[in-house]
Amino acid sequence: MYNELKRLLRQEGNFDPSDSILDEFLGSMEEITVRPRERLIDFGKVNSDVYCLKEGIIRLFHYEEGKDITFGFATPGTVILSPHSYYMRQPAFLLAETCKAKATLLRMSKTRFDSMLQDIPEFSRWMFNLAMGQLYSCEHKLYLINGTARDRYLSVIRNRPEIIEAVPSKIIASYLGVTPQYLCRLKSEVMRGVKDE
């Protein structure tokens, strides 16, 4: 039933969970749909549920000095949760929101997730591997988007082309740390460079 999602989940880390673990994980979740530009995890609210993105793109961001700063993007096969809410039962700091299109996710309660972690050693190893993979991704993002704004934009085009199509320019600008106007100039420069080649 979830063959494509299982394939994507296996690509998220370097631990290969068995089919039975994937079936139990996905089979223990309920499917939900989130409308375009709707919050899945909202600032200041406790949300300790665990999600697996099935379809769509979710942006992860936080507020800083009155503006939102995009931290990253979740694509199908990504497990999403609020660390503040899940681990410390505190209101969320990192928000999760759909982009231009709706998203389909699977949701599991913290209670069920904790039970699986405690009762199934293979599941625990897999989730630990995913957590380490997300820490790696944070560091890797810093590596990938170093350099000038143009270098960072080209890196996104090369490494995450689906983001360019599915995410509004304002959010991409936030992710790159530039203004929307500057991103517009960058896009024009890059397009002229492509045409000149």
Image (cartoon, helix red, strand yellow):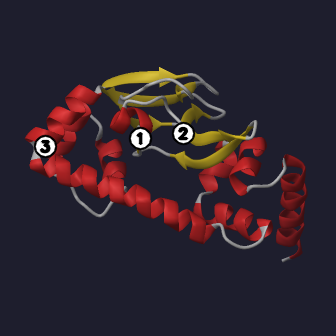
Mark 1 nearby-residue class (10 Å; few <14, some 14–19, many ≥20): some
- Say which of 10 and 86 sits in front: 86
Which is nearer the eye, 63 or 28? 63
Does 156 sit above or below residue 38? below
Which residue type does callout 1 highlight?
Pro
- Picture quadrant where residue 134 is located: bottom left
* For the residues bearing labels 2 and 1, Cβ distance under 8 angstroms: yes
Element at badge 3?
helix
Question: Would residue 116 be visible to someone looking at this image?
Answer: yes
- Tell me if residue 12 comes above or below residue 51 in the rendering: below
Query: Residue 31, labelled with which disc?
Result: none
Q: Secondary structure at mark 2?
A: loop
Amino acid type, callout 2: Leu
Residue matched to label 1: 83
Residue plotted at (85% across, 61% down): 186
Q: Amino acid at mark 3?
A: Ser
Name which of mark 2 and mark 3 comes first in the sequence: 3
Q: What mark, if any, has residue 94 been given in the picture? A: 2
Q: Which residue is mark 3?
A: 20
Q: Residues within 10 Å of mark 2 (few under 14, many from 20)?
A: many
**Quarter of the image containing the N terminus?**
top left
Q: Are marks 2 and 3 in contact (CB under 8 Å)?
A: no
Quadrant (top left/top right/bottom left/bottom right) for the C terminus: bottom right
Q: Is residue 90 left or right of residue 151?
A: left
Identity of the residue drawn at 80% across and 55% down: 178
- Other residues around mark 3 within 10 Å, as few (<14) / some (14–19) / many (≥20): few
